[in-house]
Amino acid sequence: MFRLACLVASVGLALATIAGRLAWNAWPLELFTNFPVQLTIASGLLVVVSAIARARVGWIVAVLCVGFNGVVVVRTLATDVRVARKDAPTLTIGHLNAQTRSIDIAGLSRYLRATRPAVFVVLDPTQPDVAALAGAAPGYHVHMTGSAPGRAATYVRAVVLTSVPVAHVDHPADPGFGPSAVELSVLGPAPLALVAFGTDSPTTPTRALHRDRSLDAAARWSRAHPARRVVMGDFNATPWSPSFQALLHKGRLFNSLDGFGTQPSWPESNPLLRIPIDHALLGPALAATERGTGPSFGSQHRSLHLTVAALR
């Protein structure tokens, strides 16, 4: 019975591996593309268990699963950092998807004072937190946007804290973006265009389509802006997802994660299932000199920060 259990488990892992590695974009099969790290670990454990149980077929299948998933993980870890120009000025940007959860404003204030990002975006704050965010850190200007371009932010969907001059802070005009989105232009010695947005979680086929609609809007935004551009936010897709790869290709973007590992960001409450779905993508004239995840401040998403500089 133990050997049979190993065989059944290995077949299940094999089916999940096939679905993930073929990168099918049909829901729900596309969800398997997001978990190569977890599938590698699970397959490795099954190799050990099958060896102890002398379940030969299960062991062979589990080894194959380790290989197919491990190649994806190793390839991700082996990516190179794009090298910025040595004398280029740098700019640090961060964001947090608050998920309409009450967040630790005092903790965020300490974080901002300690790290001093030039721009920090909070998506989907609770409305009671909006006023508190306005005074979260001295020296920051506060900008707020609602759920549509040009509409007064009576219900705030994004708060932008800036310590550098910015312009054109508004909800993007493209209707493909959902309500949680903001675009702006950073001025000064390290100018760039920035859009930050959140997407629907792909828990149903309809929500997956809405997620992809937002990612398509981000690709169009990217192509319409200068080479010094940043597309960031909660994409609800990992670097291995076909939807994410389509955004990179259509938007002519580079992943700031290249050379920095995997940096999983969600869910904060479950490290074993945590995956990287919060991203920052860069235009062809920018490179990341530093990148990492920070505290969640009470959200299920870890915050993201990166420092960018010009390639040319």
Image: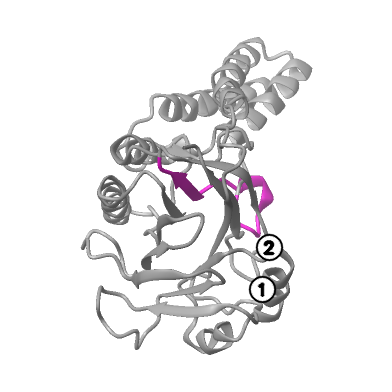
Q: Are marks 1 and 2 in contact (CB under 8 Å)?
A: yes
Residue pictured at 50% horizontal, 37% vertical: 311
Residue pictured at 63% horizontal, 37% vertical: 260
Q: Between 20 and 214, which is closer to the camera in this rendering?
A: 214
Badge count: 2
The residue to which callout 1 is attached is: 108
Q: Quadrant of the N terminus?
A: top right
Q: Between 307 and 11, which is closer to the camera in this rendering?
A: 307
Residue pictured at 53% horizontal, 65% vertical: 119
Residue type of the residue flagged with mark 1: Leu
Q: Earlier in the sequence, mark 1 or mark 2?
A: 1
Q: Is residue 309 visible?
A: yes
> As displayed, is residue 170 above or below residue 175?
below
Q: Which residues are magenta?
A: 265-283
Left or right: 82, with 114 as reference point: left
Residue pictured at 75% horizontal, 21% vertical: 48
Distance between mark 1 and mark 2 Cα atoms:
8 Å
**Mark 1 residue element:** helix
The image quarter containing residue 133 is bottom right
Left or right: 191, with 308 as reference point: left
The residue to which callout 2 is attached is: 295
Q: Between 201 and 10, which is closer to the camera in this rendering?
A: 201
Residue type of the residue flagged with mark 2: Pro
Which of discs 1 and 2 lies nearer the camera? The answer is 1
> As displayed, is residue 199 above or below residue 44?
below
The x and y percentages for residue 136 are: 63, 82
> As displayed, is residue 236 above or below residue 166?
above
Q: Callout 2: 10 Å neighbours few (<14), some, many (20+)?
A: some
The image quarter containing residue 252 is top left
Left or right: 214, with 259 as reference point: left
> As displayed, is residue 96 above or below residue 75?
below
